[in-house]
Image (tube, grey):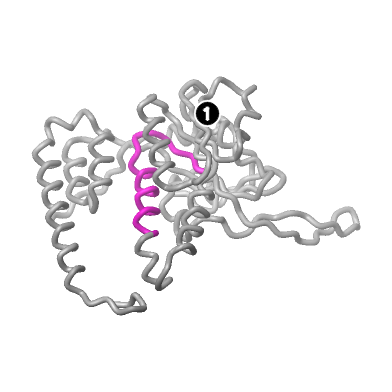
Amino acid sequence: MQLQTAERKRAKIKMSLQGPSGSGKTYSALLIAFGLCNDFGKVAVIDTENHSAELYAHLGAFKVLNLTGPFTPEKYIQALDVCQKAEMEVIIIDSVTHEWENLLEYHSSLQGNSFTNWNKVTPRHNAFVQKILQTPFHVISTVRTKQDYVLNEKNGRVAPEKVGLKSVQREGLDYEMTLVFDLDMKNNAIASKDRTGLFFGKPEMKLSADVGKSILEWCQSGSDINSSDVQDRISECKSMQELLTLYKMFPQFQQSLKPEFESQKRKLIIKADDDRKLLSQLPVHKNGII
């Protein structure tokens, strides 16, 4: 354990576009994706919205992976692996809302204590989130927001206007993202979270390829990741899935850091065995509460 001077590394952006249906999330995500890589052939859309991404095929020859229900976290993870093997540079997940709705439905179907049943749900959701965060490419996720209507006065007349409310995803997902844009029904966006410092506090705007180019410049302005950085991240892995994702993320360090990967793998296996032994010794009452 030692103190180090803070240094920002080169990164792949992990961002979300939030808004109600019709706010332009898919279209905006495609424009930003093009700005990030300047090649629609390197953009893939994981589409859970019934082929809606294909409505924008005129923009360029981007790839589409159409998912059908049930929209389990594991199916999303598999789709991300397919995109990685195809060497895509930008992945759009349109949308991540279906993943959370699937887990809510699964939770409601479980028997026993509702509170303890979250232990069967949370690890699956966390694995999905970690997959997004640790993948070696740019990821843009779209998130639906609940809809409502407000009365606004325009030209001396009062008329209802559709607005977005709370995002339909597990609370806290936006904390994991580097950048979050909220879109309204006029397709205007404002940054509700911005670790890049590029957009926070600025007036609402239309998202475009130029926005993607600005984000790319920020991502590339850091220093290169070295083996020491990866070694530190190996020791921070809390699950086999995290360790495997990290291993695949940096193929250039797989051989030189093989001993470190193997050591952490053994530690995780031992910890998992100890946890199982501990759980087997705890009494479980009929109502499922320990």
Against 118, is 187 above or below? Answer: above
Query: Residue 74: which quarter of the image?
Result: top left
Q: How many C-alpha atoms fall within 10 Å of the one at disc 1: few (<14), some, or many (≥20)?
A: some
Figure quadrant of the C terminus:
bottom left
Query: Which span is picked out in magenta?
Result: 121-141
Residue located 17% across and 54% down the image: 3
Q: Pick the residue in front: 24 or 69.
A: 69
Which residue appears farthest toward the right when viewing the image?
156
Q: Quadrant of the N terminus?
A: bottom left
Q: Is residue 267 left or right of residue 245?
A: left
Q: Main secondary structure of the magenta part?
A: helix
Q: Residue at x 23, y 77 (%)?
A: 283
Q: Does the magenta portion include 146?
A: no
Mark 1 lies on residue: 64
| Identity of the residue drawn at 71% across and 59% down | 148
Residue at position x 49%, y 20% in the image: 41
> For the residue marked with disc 1, what is the amino acid?
Val
Where residue 55 appears, as percent x and y from the top left, is 65, 29
Question: What x and y, as percent, mark residue 244?
Answer: 24, 41
Dot 1 falls on a residue whose secondary structure is: strand
